[in-house]
């Protein structure tokens, strides 16, 4: 006697009857659990590898994909407006920090020139040497 899985068969079903279900049930089950399809395509000519294509496909609902740690649609600026805003805010923060550093550097430079104001009457070579 074989040990077959009869989980989807109803209580009145024959023990070896085919399991029936509609397409919606199948789709719901696939999206809930997820499916991974993997395959490689390799083209060789006289033992010389010309092309290799590796294909990995994960079909699942958004919730199932998030549980699996896949959320690229939320972090890719090309696909998510929120990610685009975050990327723009990050770029603005980086540019503001750079501008602050440049302004601070300019103020330090002007401060050092002002402190050398007592040398204003000195020839240019003397001021340059004092820096």
Image (cartoon, rainbow, N blue to C red):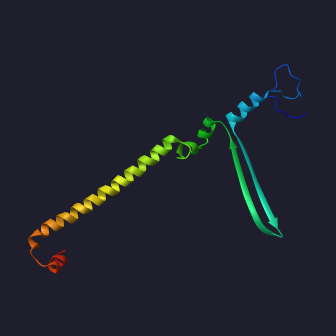
Exactly how many numbered labels are in the figure? 0
The quadrant holding residue 118 is bottom left
Residue 18 pos. (x, y %): 87, 29
Which residue does the image show at 21% across and 63% down from the upper left?
108
Q: Considering only vertical position in the picture, is 94 above or below 67?
A: below
Which residue does the image show at 17% across and 68% down from the upper left?
113
Left or right: 63, with 107 as reference point: right
The quadrant holding residue 112 is bottom left
Left or right: 95, with 3 as reference point: left
Q: Residue furthest top?
A: 12
Residue 42 pos. (x, y %): 78, 60
Residue 67 pos. (x, y %): 60, 39
Q: Considering only vertical position in the picture, is 119 above or below 71?
A: below
Left or right: 130, with 38 as reference point: left
Residue 78 pos. (x, y %): 55, 47
Which residue does the image show at 75% across and 28% down from the upper left?
25
Left or right: 81, with 16 as reference point: left
Which is more toward the observer, 19 or 107?
A: 107
Q: Considering only vertical position in the picture, is 10 above or below 69?
A: above
């Amino acid at each position: 006697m074989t040990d077959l899985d009869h989980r989807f068969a109803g209580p009145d079903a024959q023990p070896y009857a085919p399991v029936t279900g509609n397409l919606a049930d199948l789709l719901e089950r696939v999206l809930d659990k997820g499916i991974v399809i993997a395959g490689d395509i390799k083209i060789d000519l006289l033992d010389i590898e010309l092309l290799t294509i590796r294909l990995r496909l994960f079909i699942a609902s958004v919730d199932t994909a998030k549980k699996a740690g896949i959320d690229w649609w939320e972090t890719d600026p090309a696909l998510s407006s929120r990610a685009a805003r975050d990327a723009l805010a990050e770029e603005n923060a980086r540019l503001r920090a750079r501008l602050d550093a440049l302004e601070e550097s300019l103020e330090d430079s002007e401060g050092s020139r002002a402190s050398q104001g007592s040398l204003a009457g000195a020839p240019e070579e003397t001021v340059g040497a004092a820096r």
